[in-house]
Amino acid sequence: MAAVRKAVILGAAGRDFHNFNVFFRDHAGYEVVAFTAAQIPYIEHRTYPASLAGPRYPAGIPIFPERELPALIARFGVNDVFFAYSDVRHEQVMHLASLAFACGASFHLLGPNDTMLQAAKPVIAVVAARTGAGKSTLTRYLRAALAGAGWNAAVVRHPMPYGRFDKAVERYATPQDVVGSGITVEEMEEYQQHVDEGGVVFAGVDYARVLACAEAEGDVILWDGGNNDMAFFRPDLTIVVLDPLRPGEEASYFPGEANVRTADIVVINKANVACEDDIERARAAAQALNPAATIVLMASEATLDLPELVCGRNVLVVEDGPSVTHGCLSEAAGAAAARQLGAHLVDPRPYAVGSLREAYTRYPQLGPVLPALGYGAGQLEELQQTISRVPCDAVVLGTPADLARVMKIDQPVVRVRFVARDMAAPALRDLVLARMQSFKKPGGKAT
């Protein structure tokens, strides 16, 4: 009998857990001795629970900082290092491969055939070339379009179990489900607007069980991707979102390039605020990677619920966290919406405390905006303290999370909401609904 190979999975509390569940958990040829953590704070030094790891791992699996990889390879006699997270430059992946090689281990990437689950219902996957491209806005657009055509779409969000690892399946159907669940701000950012518009969102850690629950409620599964990761379910239709405000990155990041290459439809989003040259650069990049894909232009339109509090005022803009941290944007849609109303952005950097202050050092591209970081109770308190210290007329929440419901904000609060609009033919909804004609609605009748 061949010796069991010892493996470490490099992750960020998402793709890594899924790959373990579907490939390693019952694989007698491997023993996963550790996960490592990157991108997401407060994950390291925790344990992937035994309740999800299965009987081969009665103590669960420890999680270490990624910087400890060489020591872990030596300590555990690791044979194989598996990379399992997203939104990283291609060269960063290979730097980690080189590090593993230098320590004597092999380096691997698991592909779709080993990690995608087969659904019993049609699957539409919305993924991206980079994080912050506007996937969730387009997913909400598609859920409404499908509902208008008689389809009940169950939205499944890429995992982000940052607060707790032991909940295999999560279901959010109301705003109170979101704000009362104790989840992190980063999770709220992804679920809040779906449920505000009447959608039901599924997430969790064990996506075979998540899929079963979503299939029990929906006629079609609508995958709302995270970062620029690939879907966990095998798609019947893949839509990849490009951000023309960051042109030239379509083939530079992993696994975003793979998404572009496999897309049926490429959406150049934010075309209402991008210049024509950058839109054409994005179009050319998509055509070079995937000449068979249909390309559509979409607008991402921001609306403010209390614009009179922003016009010409001094405001603090709180942006979606991942977009302006590892997404590498200096500012995002909240700042753009405030500037359009002639607002002055008060720079929060002199007032930031604790980990919020450290974020500006870690992400030097950050401009005069505050990232909505709230990965734990302590960081949420630091976020509240920072907001309270900034002298401003109003707080503009560019983050989809309704922070005013989970913390005390003394200043007036203005929320920014985003809506996807078609800009030219063909319309995305028409392309998707035409594809749905090949499937049968409940009751056995063709669409």
Image: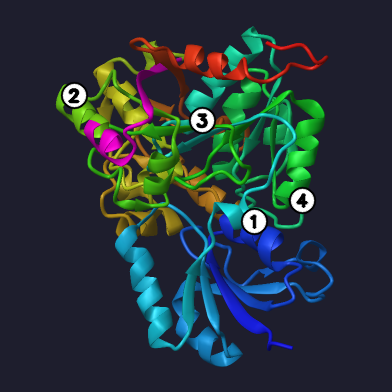
**In the rendered image, which quarter contains the N terminus?**
bottom right
Q: How many marks?
A: 4
Q: CA distance from mark 4 to mark 2?
A: 43 Å
Q: Which mark is on residue 18?
A: 1
- Left-right relation of 370 to 189: left
Nearest to viewer (mark 4 / mark 1): 1
Image height check: is 58 above or below 355? Answer: below
Mark 3: give few (<14), some (14-19) or many (20+) Cα within 10 Å. Answer: many
Q: Do callouts 2 and 1 mark residues in contact (Cβ within 8 Å)?
A: no
The structure residue drawn at horizontal position 52% and vertical position 91%, both measured from the top left corner, is 74
The one of 447 and 64 positioned closer to us in this rendering: 447
First-in-chain label (1 vs 3):
1
Assign a secondary structure to mark 1: helix
Image height check: is 259 above or below 297? Answer: below
What amino acid does circle 3 point to? Ser
What amino acid does circle 2 point to? Cys
- Left-right relation of 359 to 232: left
Mark 2: give few (<14), some (14-19) or many (20+) Cα within 10 Å. Answer: few
Mark 4: give few (<14), some (14-19) or many (20+) Cα within 10 Å. Answer: some
- Residue 43, image quadrant: bottom right
Q: Which mark is on residue 412?
A: none
First-in-chain label (4 vs 3):
3
**In the rendered image, which quarter contains the C terminus?**
top right
Image height check: is 47 above or below 137? Answer: below
- Residue 347, image quadrant: top left
Q: Which mark is on residue 136?
A: 3
Assign a secondary structure to mark 4: loop
Judging by the rendered image, the residue that carries numbered circle 2 is 275
Give the magenta range.
284-304
Q: CA distance from mark 4 to mark 3?
A: 22 Å
Judging by the rendered image, the residue that carries numbered circle 4 is 168
